[in-house]
Amino acid sequence: MNAVRLAGQGLVVAALAASAPEAAGSGARLIAAMLGALILMVALGGWLLLAFDALGGLVWPALRRTVVAGGLVRSSFYLARLARPTFERDPTGGAALAGALALLHRPAHEPALATWLEGKIAGPAKLGLAGVVATGLLAAGRGDRAGARDLMLSADNFDPELGPAAARRIANEWLVADAAERGDWATVIRRGVQDGRATAYTRFLARAAARIRGEALPGEPNPTDVGLWISWLLVPGRTVLRPLLDQARAAPRVLSQRRPPPPPADPPPPLIDPAAFAGDPVAHAQALHALWLHAPDVDKRLTATRLQELCAAWEAAWAPAERRLVQRAQAIGAQTRGELTLGGLRNLVADDLARLARAAGLPLLAFESAGPTGAAAAAALRRTLLDEVEQGSEHLRARTRADRRLSSPEELREWNHLRRKYEEAAALGGMELRYLLFPIVHRDACNYAVWLWNERKEYGISGPIFKWLLAEAEAVGDQEAIALQRKNVGSGK
Amino acid sequence: MATRPEHDDRFADNPFYVLGLRPDCSRVDVEREGQKLLGMLGLGLKSAATYATPVGPRPRTEDKVRAAMAELRSPDRRLGHEFWASLPPPAAPPKPPPAPPSAGPGPAPLAEAFAVLGWRRP
């Protein structure tokens, strides 16, 4: 409206200049005409800006389907500046996000371009949501899938009003694709239809998975055939997903949350058959041990019951193993006594079992009571988990004290690394480890976040740390930490 | 006292399996078999190129054979290796271990999940 008013004023001034009496002189007329023209130009500029703003929302979708999809990294980076309304609060991050997406569209990862983009992200002092997602995509491009997952999950911690919605959607799209590729359909269903994050692709995957698994989606019922068709038609590049659509349509529609029981699976023949060594406890324990150490997908296959079986097999094996070792030590003239060798072997077995339990994500309580072998394995795993978190926390503390700064993406990566270790320790060690570790992590992470906030103005990183610390403080019931973090979270709003 | 090899080494690179011997073999057997295998490997004989272990066949190299002989010369180290060589190597090729029942029904993992978006697989 200001532009319209200005244009009107410009026209009036120009008209007055044209009709000015001769006596006023040609000089005054010229000045008035120039003033009118100037006002007209300003008004026209305003109109152009208004029009550009209105069309600006269309720039990003158009750019994503053309320049970005074509894998033109530098062009995507520079042209994304035109998508001002989409990345209003994080223009540099938005440009880097466009570049990182374009890099993912290229047939192979190009480290030189990735480094160039990382330089662009590390440039500004503050790292916004789009910058975080861009860093995640670059990590994915390098093959660091776990790191990419961490960074994409960090997008959830940003204030929805502050971060660009497009970046949030891209992060969610990546997480859903990652979960679908791993066969983690529960995550696909949970994330696929989230408000403000879902896209046509994530919605279709979530609906198809929900239909096949006979589950209801969050906030909507199990999809109908028509609903599935429509969802599928809206996905760009849908032809690849046709088999999934057909599978989903063939599945019966279930209206309740109850899952049908899983069909019994036919166990394939084992690598080594421990049953073949039933008469020899040592060989039986070793066969089971070798079976699990070399099993593919141990994270999916090893259950608490099976680990307990392995612990029990070793318990049965130790006495005959000791007799055999003592006898063999004498026969071959070994200096070390058989009992001592057995002690070393017990430690080796405990370390292996701890590694297996960790890979399978089994909590300590699941095998700690499975005899002395289980207890030794649990102690080894507890020690490892505690050490890793303490070392990470101490490193953060030393860096904060020495004011040793990293680039914003590196800061985020380092914090994510510590958080992941802590959360793993909490998941495996339960409340016992949480009570032990929280005071240490709270002290170091809080100082670190305050340093990031005050000295670095990295609100995008420190804000989520305060929120995470508050959630943890509430979980362990640390009243002092709760009060402090409520204050910190409150000041961040 | 046994060394602390990585868990993969315990079965797959056990000196007894590398040399194709059982734990109760004599020291002379170790030297004789080791020299024989080194000769065969030097001639490039295919029959010596792999060895059987309880966790599947592994490639045999001259370095592995020399290392195995060195390990078994020390009675203390041999004692530990004997323990982990209790299992006879299977005659049949290895098969995948049994899978527990799946957590719930669902589609197979979607290998093209990133390709649909036009993205390269991480």
Image (cartoon, coloured by chain):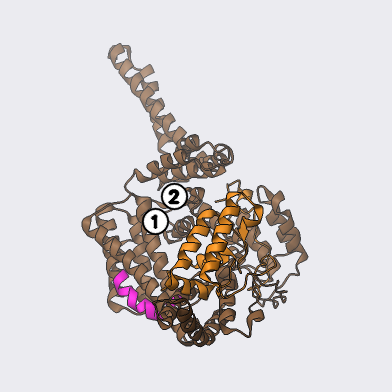
Chain colours: A brown, B orange
Query: Please, which chain is the residue tagged with disc 1 on?
Result: A
Quadrant that contains the C terminus of chain A: bottom left
Which image quarter: residue A443?
bottom left
Q: Residues in magenta?
A: A428-441
Q: Is residue B119 above or below residue A158?
A: above
Chain letter for the residue marked with disc 2 in the picture: A
Task: Say which mark, if any, is on residue A135.
Answer: 2
From where the camera sits, is residue B5 visible? no
Q: Residue at x 45, y 86 (%)?
A: A372
Apparent side of residue A85 relative to residue A472 in the rendered image (left or right): right
Does the magenta portion include A439? yes
What's the amino acid at mark 2? Thr
Q: CA distance from mark 2 to mark 1?
A: 9 Å
Q: Mark 2 and 1 residues: CB-CB less than 8 Å, in contact? A: yes
SS label for mark 1: helix
When the figure is inspected, residue A147 is found, relative to residue B5, above or below; the finding is above
Residue type marked 1: Arg
Q: Main secondary structure of the magenta part?
A: helix
Q: Which residue is mark 1?
A: A413
